[in-house]
Amino acid sequence: MTLLFIGICSWAQAQEVRDSTQTYRIIKNDGAEYVGRIIEENAREVLLKTRTLGEIYIPKHEIKEIVLLLSDGRSEEGEQFATRYFFSTNGFSLADENYIIWNLFGPDIQINYKDKVGIGLITSWFGSPIIGSIKFTKALDETTHLGYGSLLGTGSWSQLSVGGVLPYVSLTKGDHTQNVTLSAGYGLIWDDFDTSGNALVSLAAMKKSTDRISLVFDSFILYNSNEGELASLIVPGIRLETQRKRAIQLGFAATYQEGELFPFPLPLIQWFRTF
């Protein structure tokens, strides 16, 4: 009876109970993915019922990850890299998602520190300029988040006398898969001979249309107090999650000034990676 009890307990522990009415994505070690309902699972294999292939057995040692999907096909874990649009940030905390963005001009590194504090470093491939950032976040309610912080930069080795600072505040409405953010700040730039400052406003939004594709919009409105003019940068784009912890983002930037729209000739490309 003791041996039988031990055997039953061992068998029960080998079974990972999952809801057979839920939809899962199974990601294999070779990158192949299957979506369906898990009919049976044990220590050796998973029986998955898919719409296109029917029931298939997948050996456990070939499985890299099993992800629960929501009713609309999105991952329960939400959007990756949800704290960034193209350049601006929002009121969401980094949590445990440290990431680096590889831009054509250089790297952008963001690191979580004590949950609600994020620190970052932005630079070019030549190490000039060097811009540090810090952001604090606070959840006002389930769908409203506040972020505030500052960027501080220097021309570093090429222009030691040049520097700048941009304190800002961001208010985000929505969740990690669909949100809109309004940010405002005041940028101050100085060098040996001059100091100038301008107010800066940003409107950004994100909507996850499928489990892999998100629509992203970023913009900046700059008010030149000396000339009394407005200038804006507009960047609509799309983000594709190539795999877990990786994404590529493509944007089409343009400036709007004096009633005319001037598009940039080359697209804006960014590669996201977590670490």
Image (spheres, helix red, strand yellow):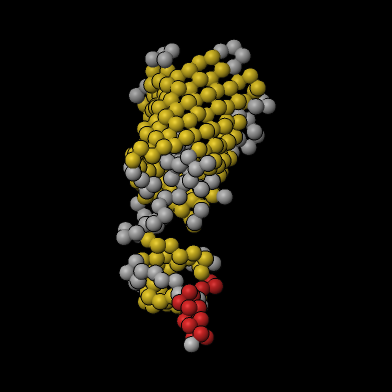
| Residue 254 visible here | no
| Residue 118 visible here | yes
Which of these two is toward me, 266 or 141?
141
Residue occupying image coordinates x 65% and y 27%:
156
Residue placed furthest toward the bottom: 1
Residue occupying image coordinates x 48% and y 78%:
9
Which of these two is toward me, 45 or 253?
45
Q: State whether residue 1 is above or below residue 113.
A: below
Q: State whether residue 241 is above or below residue 146.
A: below
**In screen coordinates, is 82 left or right of 160?**
left
Q: State whether residue 166 is above or below residue 68.
A: above
Image location (x, y in percent) of residue 200 = 42, 25
**In screen coordinates, is 121 left or right of 56?**
right
Q: State whether residue 21 is above or below residue 227.
A: below
Residue placed furthest toward the front: 2
Residue occupying image coordinates x 48% and y 22%:
187
Residue occupying image coordinates x 37% and y 26%:
260
Image location (x, y in percent) of residue 181 = 37, 36
Image location (x, y in percent) of residue 129 = 60, 29
**In screen coordinates, is 85 left or right of 121?**
left
Residue placed furthest toward the right: 157
Looking at the rendered structure, the number of numbered marks drawn on it comes to: 0
Image location (x, y in percent) of residue 82 = 43, 45
Which of these two is toward me, 147 or 13?
13
